[in-house]
Amino acid sequence: MKKRALFATTCCTVLLGMSSAWADDPRARSAELYEKGNKLFDEQKYSEAEAAYQAAWDLRKSFDLAGNLAEVEMQLEQYRDAAEHFSYALREFPAGGKPEVREALTKRFEEARAQVGAVKITTNVGGAKIVVDGKDVGQAPLPEAVFVDPGTRVIEARLAGHDDVLRTVQVEKGSSQEVNLVMVPKMGSGGGIVVGSGGAKKSLPIIIAGAGLAAVGIGTGIGLIVAAGGKSSDASDLRKELSPGDCPGTIPTVRDKCSTLKGQLEDKDTFQNVGTGVLIAGGVIAAGTVVYALWPAKRSAPTTGWQVVPTVAPTFAGLSASGHF
């Protein structure tokens, strides 16, 4: 039996009957492409239908267009794109929509989802660009998990003034996992605010800023170390659900747990290492501030100042700094 698109074209023919004054209207053009895609789909010309739906999608997004675009992607075995568009259609499905249509969308989404993996990507810095296999997928924080094809995937976070972070993950069909990318500011990169003084007199603002930055650094380091302890605790709890020799596992549910456990252990190590470094940096800033405040001033003293870079994390906000005296 010939398969039909999920949504009919009743809304579109009205727009097509409008005057030519609407020819340049994106909504009218999108409706025309939507109807063209439905016709091509019914003729089983799936590649042509995808091109028409995609062109319509680029002009105007809607839940029904997402559903039909996903359906044709299923026919072309483009499961990652299908999962993404089915997910959009379900999120935007109208409250008064027909239950049987929502049920059909849900069933097809589950079929697409079984063929791909889902990765929830988080970072400690808002606004970082997230890149998966070279494709920009948005800025952190990402509201939804990213659907990816099975296999080895490369996930990156990029932000000016910070070192790029790259993580390679192995993805199985139907799996879900979390990837946390911890970004560290580049010291002396010019991405922060510089405060300082080149005279012989001691600068009170520098002393105040140094004390504040030292407190933030020490607090941030402690926060990261505490977060590392939380990840370690989560990993311990998850280990209790696994038996020796379970990992990497062949059963999908066991594979998911093993993958999550691996991610938690990697996050624990990252938080521990970065937290220790930030804690030490806070101590160095504190010591430098004390030396600057107490050391006798000299007119030939070199310029003093701080390089201040903001850092934002899910549970705290702070500043990273480098100083010279």
Image (cartoon, helix red, strand yellow):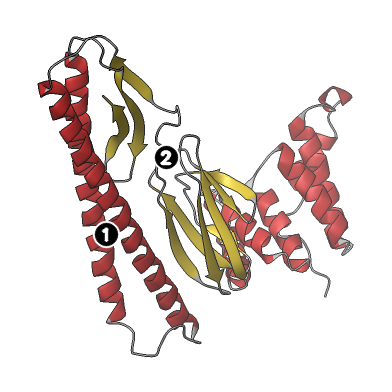
Three-letter amino acid code of the residue under disc 2: Gly
**x, y percent for residue 307:** 35, 27
Residue topped by disc 2: 126
In the rendered image, the quadrant that contains the C terminus is top left
Q: Which residue does the image show at 33% across and 89% down from the upper left?
A: 243
318 left or right, relative to 11 = left
Q: Residues within 10 Å of mark 1 (few under 14, many from 20)?
A: many
Q: Which mark is residue 228?
A: 1
In the rendered image, the quadrant that contains the N terminus is bottom right
Q: Is residue 189 above or below residue 238?
A: above
In this view, the mark in front (1 or 2): 1
**x, y percent for residue 166:** 52, 55
Three-letter amino acid code of the residue under disc 1: Ala
Q: Is residue 216 above or below residue 48?
A: above
Say whether residue 90 is visible: no
270 left or right, relative to 48 = left
**x, y percent for residue 181:** 43, 53
Q: For the view shown, which residue lies furthest in the front direction?
A: 300
Q: Quadrant of residue 13?
A: top right
Mark 2 or mark 1, which is nearer the start of the sequence?
2
Q: Is residue 211 above or below residue 258?
A: above
**x, y percent for residue 266:** 38, 65
266 left or right, relative to 6 = left
Say whether residue 225 is visible: yes
